[in-house]
Amino acid sequence: MNTLIYPSYFPNIANFWAMVNSDSVYFEVSDNYQKQSYRNRMEIYGANGKLALTVPVSYSQKNRQLYKDVKIANEEHWQILHLKSLQSAYSMSPFFEFYIDDLMLLFEQKFDFILDFNLECFDVIKNCLQLGLAPNHTTFFEKEPTGKVDYRNLVKRNTQIHSLQPYTQVFTEKHGFISNLSILDLLFNEGPNTEMYLQQQVITIK
């Protein structure tokens, strides 16, 4: 199976499920950027429940831009906030100390473009999990792609994901299981078992 999918900010679990269970992966990098998506947003499990972390971007709906041309608004010092939020949410998780050093580099470097940053986020997770994924990049946009399973809708925040199996999360006793968070939630809580978990899931997408 060939999968077409968007690279996003520390993608949610459904994104990685689609990639891990594919023969080959194609990253959609040839489209126009759209707001209100996971391209620049991830969701984690904080002490008060689900917490959204958004990378600020310089973008105007009036002037359409290609995804690859959208710049990060680095003047907002978002990296410090996001790193502190991750530390607060996951410092007590079983595998936080094992992976945090690899992730720290992403929050200490300056990236000009959101796509470049997202691709680097993917590479870091791939290396943490030692995944044999080598995604291709699209060179033109296809509304109806041929020869690929289209998972681009996973980047939309209103896409519903069903049947992910629960795993132990840091604040499960306070708020219960929260499904389909950023891959970081699964990584910090399940560590080396992350890939096996992804391979075992049978999910539905609406």
Image: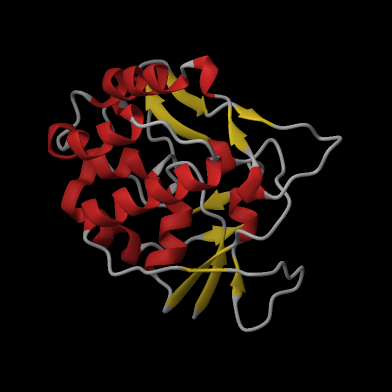
Mark yes or no: residue 202 visible. Answer: no
**Location of residue 100 (image quadrant):** top left
Residue at (47, 24) in percent of width and height: 51
Mark yes or no: residue 79 visible. Answer: yes
Extreme residue toward the bottom, this view? 147
Query: Is 193 rendered above or below residue 143?
Result: above
Q: Quadrant of the C terminus?
A: bottom right
**Location of residue 169 (image quadrant):** top left
Looking at the picture, how far across and down is residue 166, in whole percent?
34, 45
Task: Report whether 158 appears left or right of 93.
Answer: right
Residue at (24, 38) in percent of width and height: 188
Looking at the picture, how far across and down is residue 106, in whole percent?
33, 35
Residue at (34, 60) in percent of width and height: 198
Work out whether residue 146 or residue 91 is closer to the camera in this orientation and state it: 146
Query: Is 66 rendered above or below residue 21?
Result: above
Query: Is 7 rendered above or below residue 47?
Result: below
Work out whether residue 64 or residue 44 is closer to the camera in this orientation and state it: 64
